[in-house]
Image (cartoon, helix red, strand yellow):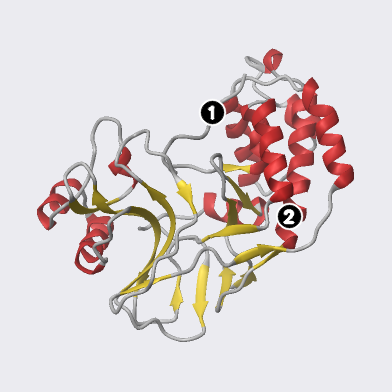
Amino acid sequence: MCIDRGRMPNKHLEHLEDSIFDGRRVALAAVKEALTVKKVSVKWDGAPAIVFGTNPANGQFFVGTKSVFNKKKVLINYTYEDIETNHKGNVADILRLCLRHLPRISGIVQADWIGVGGGSVYTPNTVEYRFATPITQQIILAPHTSYTEVSPTAEASIGVTLQSTNSVCFIDTNDAIVGKWSAVKLVAEIVALIPFCKIAKSAELKKQTNTFIRMGEIPSPELMFNVFNAKYKGEVNLTTFMVWHKIFQLKQRLLDAVVTNENVECFIDGNPSSHEGFVIPSSNPNKLVDRLTFSKANFNLNKTW
């Protein structure tokens, strides 16, 4: 089985190692992109996701969350009245600020909300960001994805840079490069094993993996296979989890090779950390995240926004 993860909004990026759960061809393509990527997009840990721009269907400027891409109940806001109708609480307050201050761009952009300007320390979600100097603009966003339409099938293009304005600080998310690294032996092992993977029930496989991550563990392939839901165990095999492990190791080596270039320090629970992760720009983008550090903390965070 092979799942096409392209040609859809950037509503959820998959971890590089989880690509094997979506099929052998998906995993091979993901590994190839990881080996050839020279520049990655920085994944800022903002929340909520903000989508804004000009809707080509009517020429009107709008703001919203990822719910603008809903199939049925589309929550798109052209006015303050729309925000009042569609949203409540902190999200509504954030969208009002966005509608007031965001530049009236011609395209459509998705960004992560970082916070209201005036300070130098921000914790929009799990990661705490400490900027070298206070942000003077009214609001702060980290843009990362563009679209050409508002639709459930809108195609996402990773890699956006917007010029900051007097009212909005747009963080550059495209300033990370990949230095020299090598994983020849790992790649050879992955390529040799992938043809023997048996894959089904992608959602169940990812759910089980996240259960281990919540506990701060990366279990052995044998344990991952042995505890997999007995109802579906006949539809996967041990080799699938062996490949997952090897792609995970490949991802960790790639993370070690990423060099960032921005004037900010990151912390989790007061301890120095790196960024949440990075994204490999492509038609089927994958995220590179240190799951034992960030994902575990994020899973166990009380989302107040």
Assess whether mark 1 and mark 2 are in contact (beta carbons under 8 angstroms): no
Q: Residue at x 27, y 62 (%)?
A: 94
Q: Circle 1 sits in a helix, a strand or a loop, which is it?
A: loop
Q: Residue at x 74, y 63 (%)?
A: 179
Instruction: Judge whether 280 appears above or below 219 on screen.
Output: below
- How far separated are the C-alphas under marks 2 and 1? 24 Å
Choose the circle earlier in sequence order: 2 or 1: 1
Q: Circle 2 sits in a helix, a strand or a loop, which is it?
A: helix
Determine which residue is flagged by label 2: 254
Q: Residues within 10 Å of mark 1 (few under 14, many from 20)?
A: few
Determine which residue is flagged by label 1: 4
Query: Residue 211 at x, y = what percent?
Result: 61, 38
Residue type indicated by callout 1: Asp
Point out the residue furthest to the left here: 81
Query: Residue 105 at x, y = what percent?
Result: 28, 60
Point out the residue furthest to the right here: 185
- The foreground one among 6 and 199 is 6
Q: Residues within 10 Å of mark 2 (few under 14, many from 20)?
A: many
- The foreground one among 293 and 18 is 18
Q: Residue at x 45, y 68 (%)?
A: 123
Residue type indicated by callout 2: Leu
Question: Which image quarter: residue 125?
Answer: bottom left
Question: Which image quarter: residue 20?
Answer: top right
